[in-house]
Amino acid sequence: MVLPVCDVCLKSGMLCQGCENKLKSGEITQMDLDIAKILYKVGDGKIGFEKSIEIGDMIIIVTEKDQVGKLIGKSGKIVREISRTLGKKVRVVGENSDLRSVARDILAPARVSGINIVYGKDGQEKFKIRVMREDSRKIPGRLDVLNQIIKELTSDETTIVVDRD
């Protein structure tokens, strides 16, 4: 697994020409750079990620599916360190994940009770993500922000609702 910035840049603290060009062109963001520095320090260069998405006070780190646990760390140690350093909530999601697993990762610790397909008048497919009523206090952010994050990751139109039962 690789970081979006080369090891030389992370060791020296200064960007090489290649990484500088990636930053200027928008291929990587300043947030990607900050997360890469933290992961390089904490994981000895063995933990990587694909990209990060910053929405509101939340950062979503996208990594390979089999690397999610490694990036979270034992008892959430690595994610806590990133969150503490950057001052934002952090979620880790596997790359190319389906809607159900992305919703589960983003909404944790709240539990997803189901996902329904809803067809609009125009025939457009939307998804209603249902969260258990007793977990409504555990939802980790504003519903509109969470819907936006899920759309960014899956390109599916979603609405998060709390079950009434």
Image (cartoon, rainbow, N blue to C red):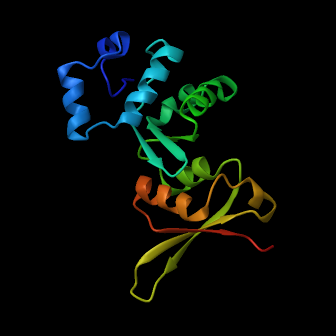
Q: Is residue 155 left or right of residue 165?
A: left
Q: Quadrant of the C terminus?
A: bottom right
Q: Is residue 7 left or right of residue 57?
A: left
Q: Is residue 74 left or right of residue 92?
A: right
In percent of the image, x 30 and y 36: which residue is there?
Answer: 28
In percent of the image, x 32 and y 24: which residue is there?
Answer: 5
Measured along the vertical axis of the image, is residue 43 above or below residue 133? above
Report x, y in % for residue 132.
75, 62
In percent of the image, x 30 and y 19: which residue is there?
Answer: 6
Residue 140 showing in the rendered view: yes
Report x, y in % for residue 9.
31, 16
Residue 50 showing in the rendered view: no
Measured along the vertical axis of the image, is residue 49 above or below residue 153? above
Measured along the vertical axis of the image, is residue 86 above or below residue 9? below
- Residue 84 sits in which quadrant? top right
Report x, y in % for residue 138.
74, 53
- Residue 113 sits in which quadrant? bottom right
Report x, y in % for residue 145.
53, 59
- Residue 123 sits in which quadrant? bottom left
